[in-house]
């Protein structure tokens, strides 16, 4: 059963030129076993901008995010239909290696999860196992600088990554993702485990990073979505608790005059 | 490091836009009065045409304010600043409309000889302009005292208007053929006096911005 | 603002307090009893065995004369057995646990294997002895050798190692694996680069438990053929052998009290060997744990 894409999603493709599209998601559906989590998601995510995925709990935004780097496949019994085009190629094509996909598309998780290794090794591990041949020291420094963490840790690179504060650990995880020099950074509620000041720092970092990376961020905090993103995609779980895309629009427009009544109800707090 | 740099930048830019609009309004007042004094119909028409620009700028600022409030959740001083910018912009645009009104009158009077050398009217205009300029300086300096003081000068404008009115009244009584020109000039003083009222509104907003309290300025007589 | 007087009665509170205190004392008493008993045992052994400890005791061979008897072959045999058992059981056990936990897909077969391993950990050790006798000594024709003994002990401790390693692997949070996969790692890179290093403290715990069990076993080794009267030190894995527990058992069964003293001294040596082994493993585990600091 294929439903036609929602009007707002179709209009979205007119929002930015084709060359500026990072992800072209077509009729993506996802099942965990017999439970359908996503239905016919059609969406284009712009390159080098911040796109926020928002919606109430259980609407499938994290599931959608994890489809973008094929991390969903770690769950047994997962089934996917539809296509996700990244740089012109369908990442779900049978001959595409998920390992290669994940090298180009990095991810930062909700609870900071640095490895129990030194700060240096945390950043260097990813490039090492992918066969990086260049100067690791430079790469580590560059990544830590880009994550706005270098000045705080440059004298203690050999210390354990777990000795840092929560906000620092999350920036370390960002540095770890940046070390692979991906094109995209996916963020799954990156600030929900952090205090407000650390949250603001990460948001400031996101604004700096978007000049070079495409960023897709899942957040249940609407204010954060409005502060930090350029485009917003709003999802809802319908009656059968299947996640669907309701509206996709530039953020300034979405939060001042959303087109769909459900969007308006959600952001004004009239439901969910 | 300012974690909300983008937002604070946007706030500063908004403030700059408002100040630029204020300069446009000042210029409009200047040129409208100049057109009146010199009986320059062409200049008057230009002022009328440029009012469209002032209107457009006001709507641009308003839209930005709405977007900023919706996406950045300003609080405390930032919120009062944004609201003050919104209100002041609206007052500025109304002042622009009054300047346009004066220019239209200037165009009407351009082909008739001056009733008398214009002295008091330009003086009123100069004072209004000075009040506007200083009120914006008080905004930048966040100086509530200065704002209140400027608001009190509205009395002087009212006095000047009264004076010009009496003078024009004597002209009209002595020589009925001057009635048309005199009434137009009374309209000009009326517009200038309304502009001064707008400036007192602006000063009210500045006081709110600084103190968080809405007071009527100038304070009403006890 | 105190609750209404009718709902909470003061005597009930006192009864709760009393009950709590009763449990405290009971727990304290049990601990004291356990410690006291152990202390008494230790003191008894020290009293009997300490005088008998000497360099000659450690280097002598067993003899019919208690004064001349020593534990050299038993000591060497125990140490050699442990080393060989570890070499056989550790790689196998850890690899099996990693495969079961990280690679194998959940199916009825893996469920069956899991259940069986858990059961095997509880099987009496003498059964392993019988298995060793039939399989290693007779069928594989290894005779009553150190190798046969080590293989038997390896089978014995394998379930312990597998179970503990699996628990240690399971304790590594899923977020660690996800982070590694998200960096473009293959499954083996995730397992050997992130999961196993993070699970090391738990794995070491399993090793400690396994080796402590192995060093104290007597029954299965008797069945496999370790005898008490060995006149030489084993030089190859195929040589006959004996171990400390068997030597102790042998001396304790003799009527002469002098041999009982020997047994006590041998027990002390066994304890020292066991404690050194544990200490090494604990030091290694703590070093691994310090770098993890969840």
Image (spheres, coloured by chain):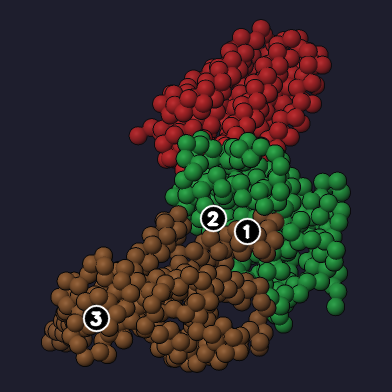
Pick the front one: C220 or C195: C220
Give the chain of mark 2. Answer: A
Q: Are marks 2 and 3 on the same chain?
A: no
Instruction: Kindly identify the residue that appears in the image at 86 percent across and 69 percent down.
Output: A4
Q: Identify whether C100 is placed above or below C227.
A: above
Colour of chain B in the rendered structure image: red
SS category of the residue bearing label 2: loop
Circles 1, 2 touching at the beta carbon (< 8 Å) = yes
Q: Residues within 10 Å of mark 2 (few under 14, many from 20)?
A: many
**Quadrant where the N terminus of chain A lies?**
bottom right
Q: Is C231 situated left or right of A272 in this image?
A: left
Colour of chain C in the rendered structure image: brown
Instruction: Kindly identify the residue that appears in the image at 61 percent across and 15 percent down.
Output: B121
The residue wearing badge 3 is: C65
Query: Which of the chains is green?
Result: A
Pick the front one: A217 or A80: A80
Distance between the Cα atoms at labels 3 and 1? 65 Å
Q: Is B189 situated left or right of C51 in this image?
A: right
Q: Identify whether B210 is placed above or below A79.
A: above
SS category of the residue bearing label 1: helix
The residue wearing badge 2 is: A115
The residue wearing badge 1 is: C180
Question: Residue A194 in the image: x percent, y percent?
Answer: 49, 54
SS category of the residue bearing label 3: loop
Q: Is C222 situated left or right of A201 in this image?
A: left
Distance between the Cα atoms at labels 2 and 3? 61 Å
Distance between the Cα atoms at labels 1 and 2? 9 Å
**Quadrant where the C terminus of chain A lies?**
bottom right
Q: Identify whether B219 is placed above or below A213.
A: above
Pick the front one: A212 or C135: C135
């Amino acid at each position: 059963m294929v439903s036609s894409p929602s009007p707002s999603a179709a209009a979205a493709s007119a929002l930015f030129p084709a060359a500026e599209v990072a992800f072209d998601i077509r009729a993506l559906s996802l099942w965990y076993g017999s439970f359908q989590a996503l239905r016919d998601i059609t969406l284009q995510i712009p390159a080098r901008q911040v796109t926020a995925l928002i919606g109430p709990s259980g609407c499938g935004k994290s599931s959608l995010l994890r489809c973008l780097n094929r991390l969903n496949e770690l769950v047994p019994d997962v089934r996917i239909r539809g296509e996700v085009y990244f740089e012109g190629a369908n990442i779900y094509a049978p001959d595409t290696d998920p390992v290669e996909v994940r090298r180009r598309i990095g991810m930062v998780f909700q609870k900071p999860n640095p490895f129990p290794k030194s700060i240096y090794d945390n950043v260097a591990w990813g490039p090492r196992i992918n066969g990086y041949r260049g100067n690791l020291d430079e790469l580590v420094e560059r990544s830590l600088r880009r994550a706005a963490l270098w000045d705080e840790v440059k004298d203690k690179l050999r210390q354990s990554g777990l000795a840092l504060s929560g906000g620092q650990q999350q920036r370390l995880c960002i540095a770890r993702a940046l070390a692979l020099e991906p094109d995209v950074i996916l963020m799954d509620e990156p600030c929900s485990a952090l205090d407000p000041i650390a949250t603001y720092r990460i948001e400031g970092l996101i604004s700096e990073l978007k000049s070079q990376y495409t960023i897709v961020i899942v957040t249940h905090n609407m204010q954060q979505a409005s502060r930090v993103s350029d485009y917003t995609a709003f999802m809802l779980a319908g009656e059968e608790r299947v996640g669907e895309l309701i509206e996709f629009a530039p953020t300034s427009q979405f939060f001042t005059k959303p087109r769909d009544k459900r969007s308006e109800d959600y952001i004004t707090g009239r439901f969910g | 490091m300012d974690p909300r740099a983008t937002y604070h930048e946007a706030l500063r830019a908004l403030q700059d836009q408002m100040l630029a609009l204020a300069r446009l309004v000042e210029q409009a007042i200047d040129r409208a009065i100049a057109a009146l004094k010199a009986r320059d119909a062409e200049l008057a028409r230009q002022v009328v045409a440029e009012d469209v620009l002032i209107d457009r700028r006001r709507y641009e600022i308003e839209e930005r304010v709405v977007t900023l409030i919706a996406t950045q959740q300003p609080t405390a001083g930032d919120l009062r600043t944004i609201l003050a910018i919104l209100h002041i912009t609206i007052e500025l645009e109304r002042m622009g409309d009054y300047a346009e009104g004066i220019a239209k009158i200037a165009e009407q009077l351009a082909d008739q000889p001056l009733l008398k050398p214009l002295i008091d009217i330009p003086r009123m205009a100069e004072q209004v302009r000075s009040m506007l300029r200083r009120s914006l300086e008080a905004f930048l300096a966040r100086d509530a005292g200065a704002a209140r003081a400027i608001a009190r000068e509205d009395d002087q404008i009212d006095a000047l208007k009264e004076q010009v009115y009496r003078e024009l009244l004597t002209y009209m009584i002595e020589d009925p053929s001057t009635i048309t020109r005199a009434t137009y000039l009374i309209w000009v003083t009326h517009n200038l006096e309304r502009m001064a009222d707008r400036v007192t509104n602006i000063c009210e907003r500045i006081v709110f911005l600084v103190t968080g309290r809405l007071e009527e300025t100038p304070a009403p007589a006890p | 603002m105190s609750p209404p007087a009718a709902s909470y009665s003061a005597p009930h509170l006192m009864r709760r307090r009393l009950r709590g205190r009763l449990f405290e004392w009971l727990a304290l008493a049990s601990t004291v009893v356990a410690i006291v008993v152990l202390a008494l045992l230790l003191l008894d052994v020290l009293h009997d065995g300490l005088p008998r400890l000497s360099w000659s005791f450690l280097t002598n061979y067993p003899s019919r004369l208690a004064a001349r008897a020593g534990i050299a072959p038993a000591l060497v045999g125990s140490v050699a057995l442990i080393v060989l058992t570890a070499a056989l059981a550790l790689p196998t056990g850890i690899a099996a646990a990693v495969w079961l936990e990280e690679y194998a897909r959940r199916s009825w077969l893996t469920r069956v294997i899991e259940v069986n391993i858990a059961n095997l950990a509880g099987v009496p050790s003498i059964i392993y002895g019988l298995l060793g006798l039939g399989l290693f000594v007779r069928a594989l024709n290894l005779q009553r050798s150190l190798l046969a003994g080590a293989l038997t002990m390896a089978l014995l401790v394998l379930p312990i190692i597998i179970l503990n390693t699996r628990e240690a692997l399971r304790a590594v949070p899923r977020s660690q694996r996800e982070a590694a996969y998200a960096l473009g790692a293959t499954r083996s890179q995730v397992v050997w680069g992130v999961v196993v290093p993070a699970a090391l403290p738990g794995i070491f715990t399993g090793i400690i438990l396994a080796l402590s069990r192995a060093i104290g076993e007597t029954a299965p080794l008797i069945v496999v053929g370790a005898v008490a009267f060995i006149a030489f030190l084993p030089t190859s894995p195929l040589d006959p052998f004996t171990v400390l527990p068997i030597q102790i058992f042998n001396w304790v069964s003799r009527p002469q009290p002098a041999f009982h003293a020997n047994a006590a001294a041998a027990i002390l040596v066994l304890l020292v060997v066991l404690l050194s082994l544990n200490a090494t493993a604990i030091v290694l585990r703590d070093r691994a744990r310090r770098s993890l600091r969840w």
